[in-house]
Image: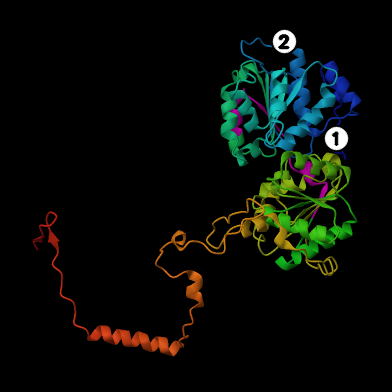
Amino acid sequence: MTETHLSETKFADLEIHETVQKGITESGFEFCTPIQAMALPVALQGKDISGQAQTGTGKTAAFMIATLHHLLNKEKKQSDKKNPIRALIVAPTRELAIQIHEDAKPLIKYSDLKMGLAYGGTDYDKQRETIEKGVDILIGTPGRIIDYFKQGVFALDALEVIVLDEADRMFDLGFISDIRYLFRAMPKPEDRLNLLFSATLSHRVAELAYEHMSEPEVVKIEAEVTADRVEEIAYMPSNEEKIPLLMGILQKANEQRCVVFINTKHMAEKIEAWLQENGFKCALLSGDVPQKKREKLLQKFKDGDVNVLIATDVAARGLHIPNVNFVVNFDLPTDAEDYVHRIGRTGRAGASGTAISLICETYAMNIMDIEEYIEHSIPVERDINDLVFKDPVKPDLSKLRSNRKKDSKDKKGHSKSKSKGPENKQPKERERREQGNPNRMPRQDRRKKNTPQKTPEQREAEKLAALEKRKSQPAPKRRIPLRGRRDIEVPAVG
């Protein structure tokens, strides 16, 4: 590899279909990245690929160019079923599926191939109508793809190319049984082009490749391709110092674009409240954010309307956001692999970046697994006095969504009834019979009854007197158990 993030291999030197080559040239790409330089010559020959490369190294362009080249050079297979698709690209997250679709548009521009999207959260009928009109390439997430497939919206019997992106993430999110279901509906592995890409080629990913691919060639680009361009640093604050330290780091960054990673949604909401109260332009991206709102937040971040994106690990993969200057691990991830994917949000496509980690009291033990996984120690800066934000304004945390959910429940955990109209007041006086025992004194009257309060000594004396009285009384006669039919009692034997 040269001093840049590119290799010495030119796209023009590869035997890529002319219409795809035209899209590559118009996009301004001349040299391949290392993963493209290694994977494309093999995939263009129609051989299966099992590739390992970190995020931001050009995997998307590698499998899209190979897919388009394969479809344009092969005749479409015949099928008796409705709407057979020619290529299927499966991604673990909605954001990644959308990103792949966007990246493929300039490459497919000069061909007559049609693409479709299938991902959950929004546009169910719109996506279905697009697919029913006929698409050659379907890009999407496993759940929505299987939903449409079971309804017969499209068929897989004439599939020519299957691409699995972020295969290791499929396992993490529990999608692997869905992936196997789709594989069983496709033609045999030798009758299609199989391209699998993953950040880590673990044993379970290798097993998947062995089972559902036809003698794939393994292509590996080590993690240092991106990690050597990311400067890593760590601080060791107490739990109370974490938020002021984060605000101090963001203040010093002077509105540079930053992604802050949090482990829990509640803490993410808390961080958002603190930053907004102290004048920082930020947005929150978590798993429960509706898809349309999520896309708007990401667009605002890309456009620079907000410079701080607070995210749980839902954003750790599949988001290609250019010019992210640094990331902050507010909470150290519990999975060491997630650390690599988090810091991969910066230093993309050969750019430099900074990854800052806060080693706090709660997640300090995770640093050992992380350093063991990345095979180097992270420099720690212990002096944080000059970085801590001075006199931050405390927000009203009672307004957080997670706190409101807690307040909506009573002490026993039961949901409180909500008002269904402008007036939901109970009548002041109700019939005693509706309240329960009609002969019992109403509660408000029992409370108003003036009964003299007894001192603890008096109550203790009454207990002792009752105990003495009970001891002085003769013991009750022992009852003999009876048995028999009703009204005919016979003493039990023994």
Q: Which residue is mark 1?
A: 6
The residue at 78%/60% (across/down) is: 274
Where residue 45 appears, as percent x and y from the top left, is 73, 18
Residue under the point 59% across and 26% down:
182
Asked if residue 56 is positioned above or below residue 368 in the image, the reply reads above
What segment is highlighted magenta in the picture?
206-232
Gap between marks 2 and 1 measured at Cα: 34 Å
Foreground: 421 or 80?
421
2 or 1: mark nearer the eye:
2
Relative image position of residue 425 (x, y in whole percent): 61, 59
Please tell me the numbered disc located at residue 75: 2
Neighbourhood count class around disc 1 (C-alpha, 10 Å): few under 14, some 14–19, many 20 upward: many
Instruction: Classify the position of the C terminus by image quarter.
Output: bottom left
Query: Can the viewer see residue 316 in this picture?
Result: no
Q: Which amino acid, by three-letter code, is at mark 1? A: Leu
Residue kind at label 2, given as amino acid type: Glu
